[in-house]
Amino acid sequence: MHLRAMTHVDEALGQDGRITLLVIGRPGCEDCTKWHRDLEQWEEVPLLDIVTLNIRSELGSEFKEANTWAAHIDMVPFNVLYVNGEACAHWNGGQHAALTEHLSQAGVLPSS
């Protein structure tokens, strides 16, 4: 699966029948790097787009201003799942089990 960096603060996420996983991290975060590597090898959901955001970048600061809930993120990686343009789940850490569970709850994957 291909990861791409967020390009602007008002980017549409989870639109046009696709699902977006926004992975918020910071430079030097070993857990973030590992989660990115794991996600690049994950092929479970063909309609899943994975977008990364460096919370310490200028764009990260703009994102926190536009999304007040993001100002409280203290543990990374922090994941936000967008379906139909709405954030429907969020969680800390980089575990496939959590991602699969949230995708199931959103109706993207069959429940196990």
Image (tube, rainbow, N blue to C red):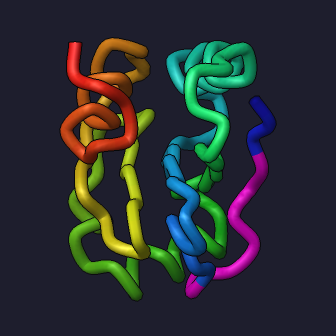
| Residue extent of the magenta highlight | 4-10
By secondary structure, the bulk of the magenta-drawn segment is best described as: loop
Measured from the top left, where is residue 18 in percent x and y?
57, 59
Whether residue 3 is visible to the viewer of this picture, yes or no, is yes
Relative to 98, 78 lies left or right: right
Indicate the quadrant where residue 36 lies: top right
Residue 106 against residue 92 in the figure, above or below: below
Report if residue 33 is visible in the image. Answer: no
* Camera-side residue of 27 and 98: 98
Magenta-colored stretch includes residue 8: yes
Please report the residue visible at 40 percent of the width from the left and 60 percent of the height from the top.
82
Query: In the rendered picture of this protein, how many numbered marks are placed on residues?
Result: 0
Q: Is residue 47 above or below residue 31?
A: below
The location of residue 5, given as percent across then percent down, is 75, 55
Q: Is residue 84 magenta?
A: no
Q: Quadrant of the N terminus?
A: top right
Q: Is 62 located above or below residue 92 in the figure?
A: below
